[in-house]
Image: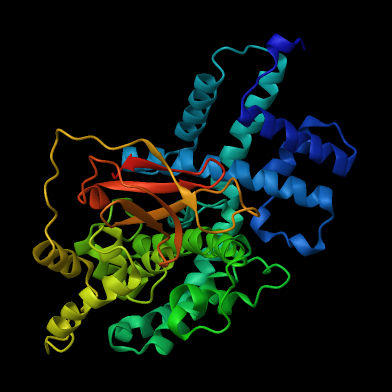
């Protein structure tokens, strides 16, 4: 086929790749045999450990295609409010294909069209025949193999999660052990396995301890090691773990809504059966603290170091720590209302703007991660702004602009770019 006749989208490339891998594995070029393979192959039932590399490539590619096809089916049936018949599903898949490939009319398109529709029909008939299972997989936002891992892991996670109802009253060691155990559990899923620390770094739980509870952590990094530890935290806890926790939470929400796809409000959270601390763990990881109230105060710009926020949170503990109602003091609605009542946000003058970027003097060695971007928080004196990371380490300093307002701390996000020696700002959304 000429170049102008070749479908060029990622979907076409994926379908072509799957067919090529199948031909490499079988040595066959029979379209009927390939279609039969598409009808019967269930990636989730295949052990990757026992496969050759080409077999793994084919299985993973087919699993990626299944993720797209499941999304198409579940979303269409959600809009319709009923399960599609086989004829309706085939017609809808054909329309999806035609819309995607309206500009292509080649033999290659006709071949891929058949592959796409056949796999879509077989997925519902042979691979995932239960509508409830398809919805659960869809809610994980993962390819089906990883989605099934998360669903199975959720059953194991429930007893551990349920122990978190008493988190508010625990001491720092008990709190840390709970968060550590949750991370360790979620890392059992292959998609969210923690990476090995670099040479010279301690084990992942010691890095986590330093991040969440630095006053009681041993060892701690030297100034030269801080950026490397931050990099490990960013990749493994802020990204990988928080992603996995979000997927697990989505399974709980799906169960609470009995498979109905709808948004969840703060008021709906208790229906999941999960303690409020599960809601807060992501924020704890992001802001480097074991205290949800501290994390919320920092996220809302009411405080700019963990120490400052922790002191402000003491009033909340005095007020709600022993109210005798049996309600969980970590209820996010209650914390939100308390913060809004005790620390109202001042209104900024609309006449003044904010710099897009400002030159800074770096106070740390960023040579190992020069192109990274670091979220920073400002504190000010008469003439300078001091830029801290969320854990309280001063990373840079700069002259204070003449039109600086303290209200910017709660209305904007700030990011340090070491390679350019600037801090940039953007409006907080």
The answer to whether one can see residue 346 in this image is yes
Image spot of residue 20 (x, y percent): 80, 34
Q: Nearer the viewer, residue 86 or 323?
A: 323
Image spot of residue 31 (x, y percent): 78, 30
The image shows residue 46, relative to residue 74, as above or below, that is: below
Quadrant that contains the C terminus: top left
Q: Nearer the viewer, residue 383 or 74?
A: 383
Which residue: 31% across, 76% down?
275
The answer to whether one can see residue 274 in this image is no
Image spot of residue 227 (x, y percent): 58, 61
Q: Residue furthest right?
A: 27
Q: Residue furthest left?
A: 341
Please give left or right for residue 354 compared with residue 233 in the image.
left
Quadrant that contains the N terminus: top right
Please give left or right for residue 106 compared with residue 163 in the image.
right
Which residue: 43% across, 82% down?
215
The image shows residue 58, relative to residue 202, as above or below, that is: above
The image shows residue 126, relative to residue 187, as above or below, that is: above
Q: Nearer the viewer, residue 296 or 377?
A: 377
Based on the displayed image, in which of its 4 quarters is residue 350 positioned?
Answer: top left
Image spot of residue 141 (x, y percent): 48, 51
Based on the displayed image, in which of its 4 quarters is residue 424 positioned?
Answer: top left
């Amino acid at each position: 086929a000429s170049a102008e006749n070749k479908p060029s989208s990622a979907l076409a490339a994926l379908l072509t790749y799957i067919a090529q891998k199948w031909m490499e594995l079988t040595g066959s070029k029979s379209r009927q045999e390939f279609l039969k393979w598409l009808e019967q192959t269930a990636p989730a039932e295949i052990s990757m450990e026992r496969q050759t590399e080409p077999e793994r490539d084919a299985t993973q590619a087919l699993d990626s295609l299944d993720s797209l096809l499941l999304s198409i089916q579940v979303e269409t049936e959600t809009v319709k409010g009923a399960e599609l018949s086989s004829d309706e599903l085939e017609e809808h898949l054909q329309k999806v294909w035609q819309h995607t490939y309206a500009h292509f009319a080649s033999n290659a398109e006709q071949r891929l069209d058949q592959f796409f529709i056949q796999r879509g029909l077989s997925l519902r008939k042979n691979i995932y025949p239960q509508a409830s299972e398809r919805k659960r997989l869809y809610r994980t936002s993962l390819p089906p193999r990883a989605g099934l891992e998360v669903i199975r892991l959720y059953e194991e996670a429930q007893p551990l999660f349920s122990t978190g109802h008493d988190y508010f009253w625990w001491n720092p060691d008990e709190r840390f052990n709970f968060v550590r155990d949750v991370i360790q559990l979620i890392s059992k899923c292959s998609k969210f396995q923690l990476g090995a620390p670099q040479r010279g770094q301690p084990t992942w739980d010691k890095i986590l301890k330093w991040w969440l509870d630095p006053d009681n952590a041993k060892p701690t990094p030297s100034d030269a090691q801080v950026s490397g530890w931050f990099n490990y935290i960013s990749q493994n806890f802020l990204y990988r773990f928080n992603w996995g926790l979000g997927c697990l939470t989505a399974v709980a929400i799906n169960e609470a809504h009995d498979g109905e796809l709808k948004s969840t409000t703060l008021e709906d959270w208790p229906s999941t059966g999960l303690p409020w601390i599960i809601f807060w763990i992501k924020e704890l990881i992001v802001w480097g603290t074991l205290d949800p109230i501290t994390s919320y105060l920092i996220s809302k710009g009411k405080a700019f170091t963990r120490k400052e926020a922790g002191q402000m949170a003491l009033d909340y503990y005095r007020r709600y720590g022993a109210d005798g109602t049996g309600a969980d003091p970590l209820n996010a609605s209650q914390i939100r209302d308390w913060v809004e009542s005790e620390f109202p946000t001042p209104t900024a003058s609309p006449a003044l703007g904010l710099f897009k970027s400002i030159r800074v003097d770096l106070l740390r060695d960023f040579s190992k991660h020069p192109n990274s971007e670091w979220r920073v928080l400002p504190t000010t004196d008469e003439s300078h702004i001091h830029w801290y990371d969320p854990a309280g380490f001063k990373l840079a300093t700069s002259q204070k602009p003449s039109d600086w307002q303290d209200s910017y701390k709660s209305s904007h996000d700030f990011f340090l770019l070491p390679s350019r020696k600037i801090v940039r700002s953007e409006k907080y959304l």
